[in-house]
Image (spheres, grey):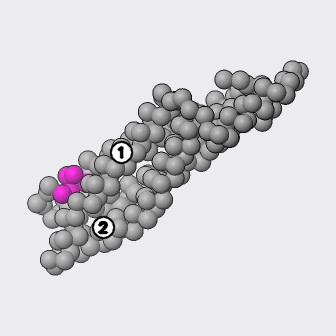
Amino acid sequence: MDRTDPAVTTTPRARTLARAVHIGASGGWLGAVITYLVVAAATLISADPEQVRGSYQVMAMLADAVLLPFAVASLATGLICSLGTTWGLLRHYWVLFKLVLNLVAAVVLVLYTRSIEHAATVAAQPTWSEADRAVLQDPAHLVHATAALIVVLAALVLAVYKPRGVTAYGHRRALRNRASPSVSI
């Protein structure tokens, strides 16, 4: 990786800090998704109404206080990392795929929190109608958590293995950088 690219103006310490925060936020997001998945599974198999009530409250709290902040932090720090290094945001397919995965997951999570909050509100009621029971037994929470786990793990694999493949923009950028002489200070 060529650190002489004039577009890269961040210091090595700043890049390392941004990468560390990104890894921490992404790892936190992964842990929160796994936790949510376990709670959602326990909620679906439970016959105890009090456990179901408590589990939905925990799921709503996890979504608002843990999942969403880690997802946003992962997205923001990923953008900072990509813009501050020669990997760039649009130069390599793996970076672009990670961005798309993160954006889609974050948007789905933001939209899905309404469903989680609705289920938590229904679960908190002292008695449940048949329609309420259908809401509380909906496996969508488990399905969404499983999909989120797959997405976050896919981003992790992309970050570790960095598959080859330069976008057309990245190819033009590399040719332009080779054609212009590097300035050494």
- Find the magenta span and give its range: 40-44
Q: Quick one: 173 or 68, which is closer to the camera?
A: 173
Q: Please, what is the dominant secondary structure of the magenta stretch?
A: helix
Using the image, determine if residue 38 lies above or below residue 131.
above
| On-image quarter of the C terminus | top right
Q: Quick one: 145 or 168, which is closer to the camera?
A: 168
The image quadrant that residue 45 belongs to is: bottom left
Residue 113 colored in magenta in the image: no
- The three-letter amino acid code for the residue at tag 2 is Ala
**Residue at image point 40% right, 45% down:** 151
Name the N-terminal-most of marks 1 and 2.
2
Q: Label for residue 120?
A: 2
The image quadrant that residue 77 belongs to is: top right
The image quadrant that residue 55 belongs to is: bottom left
Q: Label for residue 149?
A: 1
Residue 41 colored in magenta in the image: yes
